[in-house]
Amino acid sequence: MKITFYAHASFRLEGGGVVVVTDPYTPGPQVSNFDPIDESADVVIMSSATDRFHSDPSHVLGNPTIVNAVEVVAANGNGVVVKGVSIHAFPSMESLTWDFGRDPEDNAMYLFELEKIRFLHIGDIGNPLSDAHLAQLAGQVDVMFALAGANATIALNDLDKAIEAIQPRVIIPMHYFHPKGRLKILPVSEFISHFPAGEVTMVGGPELELTKETLPATQHIYVLEQSR
């Protein structure tokens, strides 16, 4: 299983003959300022269809199947299987306290499985995870893609509580400040300061390889560098 960090909340996961891309941003200086993905995928999963920082598959090549996690929530509480990838979604919402200049919008967290590894992408959630969702996810996540920039997304203290409840084996921070990006969010150093130094690995590049057998026995954080 190969994981590549593109930028913001977008990752490429390649395993079992399938490529999944998560939450593709709109590239270019008018929106994210990140470069296009310009690589092919089989499946693109988005936490909504309305957020330009999380839901623009136009620059993903290869005619992938597009999955809007909000629609998965609405259509089928049992999840869906797309090209062999099992996907479950959990309703969430943008921050109820942040002033967007508009009403907060729905989005969704999503849990999917590749090569027997269970991945949770927490989308663009802006509030604490509900007790019901924490109970559903506890012990069911191997790798968590965690929003680490705070501000308009989940507060870091609330994220700490979610991590403690869910107990993922691996945490990969995303959605944090990068000089190339346009959002005023926290640097990843703020997030990793909440954990002992021995639990954190600065990978030094955008890629990480994992298998079910090589998942760490105890919780570990891998900080990837963006590639776009």
Image (cartoon, rainbow, N blue to C red):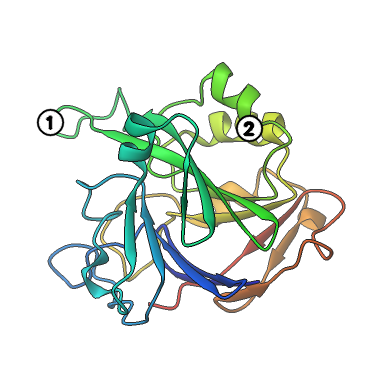
How far across and down, in percent of the image, does residue 216 sit? 83, 58
Task: Please name the amino acid that badge 2 sits on.
Answer: Leu
Left or right, 217 with respect to 82, comes to right
Query: Is the residue marked by circle 1 packed among few (<14), some (14-19), or many (20+) residues within 10 Å?
Result: few
Circle 1: element type = loop
Which label sits on residue 102? 1
Looking at the picture, how far across and down is residue 52, in whole percent?
A: 21, 55
Contact between labelled residues 1 and 2, with CB atoms less than 8 Å apart? no
Q: Quadrant of residue 117?
A: bottom right
Give the percent coordinates (x, y) of residue 167. 73, 38
Q: Residue at x 66, y 62 (%)?
A: 222
Q: From the viewer's perspective, is residue 77 above or below residue 66?
A: above
Q: Quadrant of residue 199?
A: bottom right
Is residue 93 visible to the viewer in this orientation of the structure? Answer: no
Q: Which residue is mark 2?
A: 137
62 up-or-down from 71: above or below:
below
Residue at 61%, 72% in the rendered image? 15
